[in-house]
Each structure stands twice: as C-alpha cells, then as structure tokens.
Amino acid sequence: MIAMKKFLIPVCIFITGFCGAQNKSAYLLQPDRVFDGTDMHDGWVVLVEGDRITNVGTRESVKTSKAIEVVSMPGTTLLPGLIEGHSHLLLYPYNITDWDTQVLKESDSYRTARATVHAKNTLMAGFTTVRDLGTEGAGYSDVALKRAINEGIIPGPRMIVAGRAIVSTGSYGPKGYDSDQSIMLGAEPADGNDLIRVVRDQIGKGADFIKVYADYRWGTKGEDQPSFTLEELKLINEVTRSSGRYLVCHAKSKEAMRRAILAGAETIEHGDFIDEEIAQLMKEYKVTYFPTVAAIDAINQYRGWKKGKDEEPAAVKNKKKTLRIAVNAGVTIGVGGDVGVFPHGENVYEMELMAEYGGMKPVDILRSATTINAKALHLENEIGSIKPGMKADLMAVKGDPSKSIAELRKVAFVMKDGVVVRAEK
Ligand SMILES: [Zn+2]
C-alpha cells in the first residue's frame, strides 16, 4: 500500500455511546477532489477540528500542526454530507407492507424500532441530514428518534421533523373502511379556525416546521383536488411563521400549488402537475420544488411496470414532462425522494432519476442535495457546504459524481459532527 494512512482512522462505535461525546479530534482529509457545495476543486484538502471544518483549499494553503491526523483518500471525491429533503423514516417500502397496514396495524413502538435501522442506513449512505415529512400515523415518534440520535444513543442523520402533519377532514387515508368505524389517519385532521390550535399543538410537541396536505386524491374520479381553501392555508402560514417556523405543502394539482404558493409555503412537495404558469409563480415566490421522482418510479414498478421493457405508465410520462418544465423554467429544485416508499439508504435513487427524468446535469443535482437543500431547511449556515465554520458533516465516494451521479453509491467515508461513522478500508 502506498497510502499507509488510507482510512486508518477510528470509526465511532455506536454501541459504546462514544458518539454522543464531544469530538476533540483533528483530521486533514486528502481526497482527489472536493465538491464544496457549489463547484469541484481538484487537489483540495479539508481541515476538520472538533465538530467543525476549519480550513479548506490547496495543500500548500492549509496550514496544519504536526499533531494532526492526515487521512489520505486516493481516488475519492469529498462532498458535504448529503441532505435528504423528503424522507419518512417511520415508513418502509410498500411492496413489503402496504401503507394502510403500516398505519393501521403496526404499533408506534414497532415502527420506531424499524426506524432506528432506517436512520442508520441513511447515515451510512452519506446522508447526514434529513427533513422528515411526517410519521404517517406514528404520532411524534420522529421527535423521539431525533432526540435519540442527537444524544448519541443510536446512529442516524441530523433530523428536522414535521411530526404528524395536517390534513383537512375527509380528505386523507386510510380510506375505504366502513364509515361506522373510526379509522386512525396518517396525519392530523383540522379545518377552519381549529387550524390555529392544531398548528400550535404540533409545534408544542416538537414540529420543526408545519407540513400540510394542500390537496389529496379525493376528487369525484379519485383525482387530486385541493383540500384547504386559500384562507385556511394563509391562516396556517401566519400561525406557523409567528413561531419562527415555516410551512411546506404536499401539492400535486395546479390549484393546490397556486394556493400553497400564494399562502406562503416555502416548498412544494411532488408538484405532479406543474405547468409554465406555476413554474413562474414558484420562481416569483422563491419556492423550492421537491419532485419526489423516485416515489413515482418505485410505486409504478410495485404495480407491475417493468422498467426498460414495458411502455411507461402515464404517471411516469407526466412526471418527466413536469420535471422538465420546472428545470427549463429555472425553478429551484431540491433533492427529496419520498424515501420510505423505497428503501432507506437508497436515497441516491432520487438523484439518479433527476438526471433520467429531468435531464439535470450531475453537478446541478449535487448542488440540489447540498447547498440548495441546506437553504430549504434553513440550515445553510451550518451544513451543505465545505467552508470554514461549517459543521464537519462530510462524505466521500470513490470516483467523480460530477461525471456520473451513480458514483454517489460508492460510499467510502462518512463523517457527522466531526465523528467518523464510516471509513472503507
Ligand atoms: Zn412524503
């Protein structure tokens, strides 16, 4: 071996609880190249001291003391820890267990036990932060999961969480059960002025932001139709904002997207029916779009679509069309796959599909998963870029993902808060 110190660094052992301790180590990371959240730089090194990045640049420009541990990482690209913009850590793929069964028959305890594994798999895939978009019937288990991760009890990504999320009465599932039965829902129903109380209650119980289903497939033909009036969405936004938080909206239909944007939602989730007009409105209001392409791709395969052989289902064709409208219009696009519908740890799937469906360039997709997502999460001063003062959340892959986004699957190294959690030999 030429590089004697290649990855010979202590990897945090979670079962000892060591990871919860403040990390006092210092490392000089020497990959082949560094993606800083905006551009690629050949030959750069990154200095990490404690839980922060303290310097970055060419080897000559970064001054170090002798005591520092030099970590040679030949053949790799170092990036900011990736950010998943739309996860459901309390869900797992519907081809294993359908959504109704997970929501109605599985206890919160069982689902949380599974979620601890989902969290670990996410972190090990190089995703050091997630924005979790609702527990889908598991109460505030996301708040507890976040706490256990922050305390170093279990490995997992930095989390910001929605809690239960809000739906209008009558719109959300599970559906199709005898109406004499009171069925537990996948989110909390509220309407009119009662929305004030529910938003505040969710905030009090730990929601970092408010997630609302601005539409749902409850039209007379099962199509997506708005579930809240514009006034209701404005009310939710006002109450949310006054607590220093922000509103994000599930919205697929044109009218629900329009209302969500005008009401002040910062991000639109799914956005299946974006057209030119909505794309322009999103730009005008500086809304970030999370396309959740992977959910569409996965669900259609679960329904029997043989990708690459069969003709593309209408939903797939439609998603390609709308994503390209958004990309061509210059809408700000984040990475958010609705992971949970597909396996946790496979988050890169969404990024691959942003290239395949939307024709996005790999470097733009890398920006989406780092700087753009960090801003959408209001965390741009902490994570998402490699520069002095930022949290030492980093990941490295073998190869160059600015040439092919699939290289992100070749994870060689993951660091969170300055602690090495994965280092391939
Ligand atoms: Zn979702």
Image: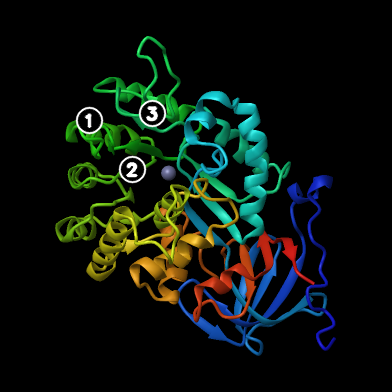
Relative to 186, residue 328 above or below? below
Q: Are marks 2 and 3 in contact (CB under 8 Å)?
A: no
**Disc 2: residue Cβ within 8 A of ligand 1's nearest atom:** yes
Q: Nearer the viewer, residue 314 or 411?
A: 314
Q: Which label number is shown at residue 232?
A: 1
Which quadrant does the C terminus fall into?
Answer: bottom right
The residue lying at 42 percent from left, 29 percent from top is 187
Residue 407, given in percent of the width and then of the height, sits at 57, 74
The residue lying at 53 percent from left, 62 percent from top is 348
Mark 2 packing: few (<14 Cα in 10 Å), some, or many (20+)? many
Q: Earlier in the sequence, mark 2 or mark 3?
A: 3
Instruction: Give the CA separation, mark 1 to mark 2.
Output: 15 Å
Disc 3 residue type (three-letter) = Gly
Judging by the rendered image, the residue that carries numbered circle 3 is: 173
Mark 3 packing: few (<14 Cα in 10 Å), some, or many (20+)? many
Badge 3 marks a residue whose secondary structure is: loop
Instruction: Give the CA separation, mark 2 to mark 3.
Output: 14 Å
Q: Which label number is shown at residue 250?
A: 2
Q: Could one spot residue 143 in this view of the protein?
A: yes
